[in-house]
């Protein structure tokens, strides 16, 4: 099999060849049909997260091993099965839930493998989908996509379930009050689309890039705000009758988290931070009780949430997110375009014709 691997942090991915693995036990081998390129790949590629104040979290020290095949938004076709892999057969097209834990601890047992302390996530801790083949340890991670095109279904594995998980944390307010979505990249437009599908009341979308604000308006945002405007928080408060009940920060920079808090309603508001851009903020502790404020993190999504998301998409249709397909061999170019902020919506790498 062939794959494009991170062999050295930040250096171009290298085309590698290794024997195609044979599935054993509960394992399932897929031929990759579509692999979405996610912003978090840039952090994994670099090998660190910016923690604010000049500090960095080194991912190689946190258990990520090179060479690594990234790619965690995958749809594939089953080509081989271990003897204990039940529920799928050769030729089935499946979306792969990549957020895998050990499968044995209490956290995994209650269905929250994404929060396991021994993560095995595909494309992060084990080999992902920037390849022609992908091994999945158990059929429970495979979801039927029905007649959805593979390239449209693939982004559900990360940008879909991540924004679904964040939107669910808002609770019933979602259908009663407009929310603020900060960031209108691939994640932001997916969040906006799912918010609609989930019966959301309306969304004010914030981005510093006019092209992305335009894309958000096209995708049905109630209003857009330039995040770089000095009065951005004031604009949000004016549009929401004094402040929003909930904001989702898909960027996760110091400035966006600050804006999220400042744009919230006086009392009882909630900020959900999803993005990993990096930074830090200071919040006066009395503000938590006095404003009855919640600041919450959300990391990808659980297996049950993936099942709910696919059920929702089957009933209500896929959110319309701008999407471009490119050959796998373009992976380095696509990652660089993403880093330069040139990608509107999602790029999905389609079947690897590696020559
Ligand atoms: Zn991702
Ligand atoms: Zn576990």
Image: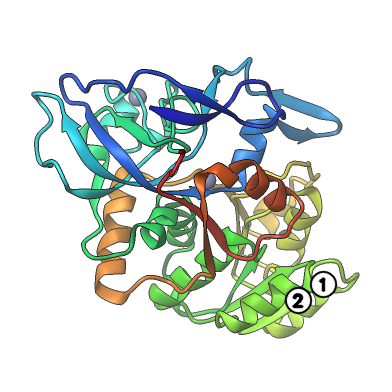
Can you see residue 252? Answer: no
Looking at the rendering, which quadrant does residue 249 occupy? Answer: bottom right
Q: Is mark 2 within 8 Å of ligand 1?
A: no
Question: Which quarter of the figure is the N terminus placed in?
Answer: top left
Vertical position of residue 246 compared to residue 289: above or below: below
Mark 1: which secondary structure? helix
- Residue identified by numbered label 2: 225
Q: Nearer the viewer, residue 261 or 113?
A: 113
Q: Is residue 66 above or below residue 145?
A: above
Rendered position, 137 above or below 78: above
Residue named by callout 1: 232
Taking the image as shown, residue 146 lies to the left or right of residue 132, namely left
Residue 133, can we see it? yes
State which quadrant residue 96 falls in. Answer: top left
Where residue 144 appears, as percent x and y from the top left, is 21, 53
Question: Closer to us: mark 2 or mark 1?
Answer: 2
Q: Could you tell me if the residues under marks 2 and 1 are in contact, i.e. CB atoms within 8 Å? A: yes
Q: Position of residue 47 (x, y in %)?
A: 67, 27
């Amino acid at each position: 099999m062939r794959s494009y691997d991170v062999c050295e942090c930040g250096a171009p991915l290298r085309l590698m060849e290794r024997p195609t693995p044979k599935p054993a036990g509960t394992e399932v081998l897929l031929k990759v049909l579509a692999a979405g390129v996610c912003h978090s790949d840039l952090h994994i590629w670099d090998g660190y997260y910016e923690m604010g104040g000049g500090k960095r979290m080194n991912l190689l020290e946190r258990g990520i091993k090179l060479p690594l095949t990234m790619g965690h938004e995958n749809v594939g076709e089953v080509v081989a099965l271990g003897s204990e892999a039940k529920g799928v057969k050769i030729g089935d097209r499946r979306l792969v839930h990549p957020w895998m834990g050990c499968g044995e601890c209490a956290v995994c047992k209650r269905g929250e493998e994404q929060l396991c302390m021994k993560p095995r996530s595909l494309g992060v801790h084990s080999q992902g989908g920037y390849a022609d083949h992908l091994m999945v340890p158990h059929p429970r991670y495979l979801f039927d996509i029905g007649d959805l095109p593979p390239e449209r279904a693939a982004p559900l594995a990360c940008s879909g379930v991540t924004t679904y998980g964040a939107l669910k944390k808002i609770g019933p307010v979602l259908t009663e009050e407009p929310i603020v979505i900060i960031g209108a990249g691939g994640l932001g437009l997916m969040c906006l689309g799912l918010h609609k599908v989930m019966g959301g009341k309306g969304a004010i979308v914030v981005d510093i890039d006019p092209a992305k604000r335009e894309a958000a308006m096209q995708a049905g945002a109630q209003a857009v705000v330039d995040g770089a405007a000095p009065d951005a928080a004031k604009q949000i408060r004016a549009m929401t009758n004094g402040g929003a009940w909930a904001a989702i920060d898909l960027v996760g920079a110091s400035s966006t988290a600050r804006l999220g808090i400042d744009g919230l309603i006086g009392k009882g508001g909630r900020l959900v931070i999803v993005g990993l851009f990096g930074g830090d903020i200071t919040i006066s502790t009395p503000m938590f009780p006095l404003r009855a404020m919640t600041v919450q993190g959300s990391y990808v999504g659980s297996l049950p949430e993936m099942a709910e998301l696919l059920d929702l998409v089957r009933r209500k249709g896929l959110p319309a997110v701008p999407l471009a397909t490119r050959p796998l061999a373009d992976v380095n170019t696509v990652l660089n375009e993403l880093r330069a902020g040139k990608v509107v919506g999602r790029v999905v790498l389609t079947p690897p014709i590696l020559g």
